Image (spheres, rainbow, N blue to C red):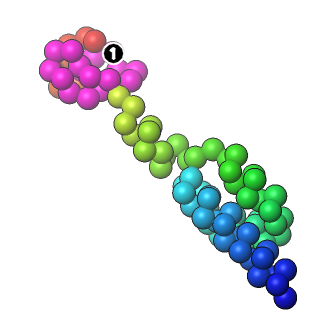
C-alpha cells in the first residue's frame, strides 16, 4: 500500500515539474505513475515551452533613437520608423 502512495507522489512531483515548465500536467501525472522516479528525471530535462518562457518575453532590443523595445530581429523601429 505504501508503494502505491509513493508512485502517486512521484507522479504528482513529475506533474509539478512539468507545470513549472509549461507542459501538460495530466500527461506528466500519468507518466509519473507509470514510470515512477524515471519520469521525474525526464521531466527535469524537458525544455520549457517557449510560449510560456518569461526569459523569451524579456528578450528584446532597444531602439537607439527613441528608446522603445524592439523585436531582436527588427530592422526598422516601428515607432520612429528609423533603421536600427
Would you say residue 71 sits in the magenta stretch? yes
Q: Residue at x 81, y 58 (%)?
A: 38
Q: Residue furthest top?
A: 83
Numbered-mark total: 1
Would you say residue 25 sits in the magenta stretch? no
Q: In the structure shown, which secondary structural element does the residue marked by tag 1 occupy?
A: loop
21 to the left or right of 81: right
What x and y, as percent, mark residue 26?
65, 70
For mark 1, what is the residue?
Answer: 75
Residue 66 occupies which quadrant of the picture? top left
Q: Is residue 27 visible?
A: no
Q: Which sits in the foreground, 49 or 38?
A: 38
Q: Is residue 53 visible?
A: yes
Dominant SS type (magenta):
loop
Q: Residue at x 68, y 63 (%)?
A: 14
Residue 63, compared with residue 53, is above or below; it is above
13 to the left or right of 78: right
Residue 12 occupies which quadrant of the picture? bottom right
62 to the left or right of 19: left
Q: Quadrant of the N terminus?
A: bottom right
In the image, which residues are magenta?
61-77
Q: Quadrant of the C terminus?
A: top left
Disc 1 residue crowd, few under 14, some 14–19, many 20+, Cα 10 Å: few
Q: Residue at x 80, y 62 (%)?
A: 37
What x and y, as percent, mark residue 58?
37, 36
What x and y, as percent, mark residue 75?
33, 15
Amino acid at each position: 500500500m505504501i508503494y502505491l502512495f509513493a508512485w502517486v507522489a512521484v507522479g504528482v512531483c513529475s506533474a509539478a515539474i512539468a507545470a513549472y515548465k509549461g507542459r501538460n500536467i495530466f500527461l506528466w501525472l500519468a507518466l509519473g505513475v507509470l514510470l515512477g522516479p524515471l519520469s521525474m528525471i525526464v521531466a527535469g530535462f524537458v525544455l520549457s515551452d517557449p510560449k510560456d518562457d518569461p526569459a523569451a518575453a524579456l528578450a528584446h532590443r532597444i531602439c537607439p533613437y527613441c528608446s522603445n523595445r524592439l523585436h531582436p530581429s527588427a530592422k526598422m523601429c516601428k515607432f520612429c520608423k528609423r533603421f536600427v
